[in-house]
Image (cartoon, rainbow, N blue to C red):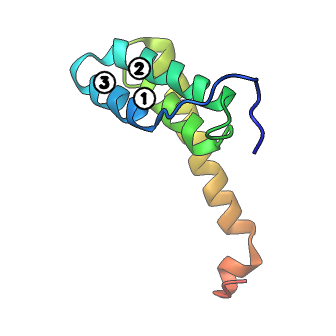
Amino acid sequence: MLPALPLPQLDLGLLLLASLAVIAVAPRAGLVMHAVLVVVAMCLDQMRMQPPIISQILLLWSTLSVRSAVIIGRAHLLALWFYAGAYKLLSPYYLDGDPG
């Protein structure tokens, strides 16, 4: 993989895990730290813009007591559940039991 920006390569795995641990102690500071580290990791191309990672950040931010963040988190969950249900309903392999 080629990096998105010509930056020095850093191993951010332990820092990302540490930022998740900080969220348990100081939620706002931990969320900011985690979001910044994920953006840096994407710029270094250590992980591409993967939907589960973006989803995790959206859902983490929606745990704060900010009304707009809660609404965005709920809308995100509704979209995920709607897509999963619609995909199963429209998939001929799911209804037939064929793993496809």
In the rendered image, the vertical position of residue 59 relative to residue 7, given as above or below: below
Mark 3 or mark 1, whichever is nearer to me: 3
Q: Estimate the x, y position of residue 21 in percent, counting from the top left.
A: 28, 30
Marks 3 and 1, how far apart at CA? 9 Å
Q: Estimate the x, y position of residue 54 in percent, counting from the top left.
A: 59, 34
Q: Are marks 3 and 2 in contact (CB under 8 Å)?
A: yes
Q: Estimate the x, y position of residue 34 in percent, counting from the top left.
A: 45, 24
Q: Quadrant of the C terminus?
A: bottom right
Q: Nearer the viewer, residue 99 or 97?
A: 99
- The local secondary structure at tag 3 comes to helix
The amino acid on which the numbered mark 3 sits, given as a three-letter code, is Ile
Q: Which mark is residue 23?
A: 3
The amino acid on which the numbered mark 1 sits, given as a three-letter code, is Leu
Q: Nearer the viewer, residue 59 or 34?
A: 34
* Mark 1 lies on residue: 60
Query: How many C-alpha atoms fall within 10 Å of the one at disc 2: few (<14), some, or many (≥20)?
Result: many
Q: Are marks 2 and 1 in contact (CB under 8 Å)?
A: yes
Marks 2 and 1, how far apart at CA? 7 Å
* Mark 2 lies on residue: 31
Q: Are marks 3 and 1 in contact (CB under 8 Å)?
A: yes
The residue at 74%/71% (across/down) is 91
The residue at 68%/26% (across/down) is 43
- The local secondary structure at tag 2 comes to helix
The residue at 78%/39% (across/down) is 2
